[in-house]
Amino acid sequence: MTLFCPPCAGEGVRSALSTALQCTTCGRQWPVLAAGTDFIAVLVPDPDAAARMVALVSAMLRDPGLLAAWADSEEALESALAGGLLTYAQAHFGAHASPPLPSADLGWLARAWTDELPQGDVAVLGCATAGEAWALRQAPALRDRALWLVDANLAALAWGQMLFDNGSVVLPYRRSATLIAWRTAQLPGPAPNVRWLCADALFPPFAPASLAAVVTVNLLDSVADPLALVQQVEALLAPGGAWIVASPWNWQARVTPVGRQLERHVAADDLEEGMVELLTGRTLAGLGTALAVQWRADDVPWRLQVHPRYAAEYRLQVLRIRKSG
Ligand SMILES: C[S@@+](CC[C@H](N)C(=O)[O-])C[C@H]1O[C@@H](n2cnc3c(N)ncnc32)[C@H](O)[C@@H]1O
């Protein structure tokens, strides 16, 4: 699959990257993290942030003790890299640590999934440490196509790659609000074949209509512009493609400005139905007009342990949405 330059796409130019990840229009050479069996291209829109993230994560892979310093850091990038890795390594793979750690149940994802897909690759946007890929590893439709795991957090991706490459890894987790500890984690079976990509879901480096399915779990209410994300997913899907979306609709003004919070655009008396209408073209002109809901579950439990004395209980709305063929 050809990848595209995110800043050029932001300026309305669809410019392909060469196999060496050089933009054929602006000439930028994009960095990669080359720590696992496959490189991880870092295609976040700000090239300086991309280079800095590669430097930081390379250093952390050489010296995992840096993670504790990042968790305490007042520097936004370090603290975000550490926070995402610590929370989702445990949430996605804590059950395979020895002894096991409390983890989140992603079992519902296989029920929401469909193997009836058009041609094309599949992308999980906002995958953190790759729990979705592990939950879907037995899906027949994923055998003969590329599964792209995409996140803006390179530390979470690099850790997930180590686990998938080796079948085991040392899992970092919060032993308390301030202390980090480590436990060996081992997958109970082979990891799926995946491609790792560090990118911004709001500036995805994929061609329009190139994806057979997109999975976004807990992403819509984690981005600054969910309306733009819905438009991006709709554009990325091939005709007949599926979008599996799950969210607790836990809007926070520090993440998503109030006017961009999807829920503000729907009738308050039936939020779940309102969100279905919004995502399928019946609320805002030009948003979701090619989309229809095929399957839904409005109340799926989702528990995230931050540390042993602090866990968050969410209820997710899970939808399988189909783009018209
Ligand atoms: C709430 S977490 C969900 C992680 C995982 N999908 C789950 O549900 O367990 C949101 C994830 O999306 C990533 N993320 C947030 N904004 C993003 C963006 N604009 N582009 C790509 N990833 C993003 C974060 O780094 C984080 O890993």
Image (tube, helix red, strand yellow):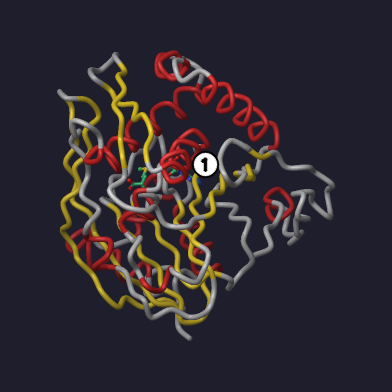
On the image, the x and y values in percent for residue 221 come to 36, 48
In what element is the residue under mark 1?
A: loop
Q: Is residue 88 above or below residue 183?
A: below
**Picture residue at 49% right of the left edge, 55% below the top:** 194
Of residue 64 and residue 225, the one placed in the foreground of this image is 64
Residue 116 horizontal/vertical position (percent): 38, 81
Residue with the mark numbered 1: 152
Q: Tell me: 171 left or right of 287.
A: left
Specify whether 8 is left or right of 272. Answer: right
Quick one: label 1, few (<14), some, or many (20+) residues within 10 Å?
many
Q: In the rendered structure, which amino acid carries the disc numbered 1?
A: Ala
Q: Return the residue nearer the eye: 273 or 259.
A: 273
* 261 left or right of 59 in image: left
| One can see residue 197 in this view | yes
Any atom of ligand 1 within 8 Å of the CB at mark 1?
A: yes
Q: Quadrant of residue 45?
A: top right
Ligand 1 positioned in quadrant: top left
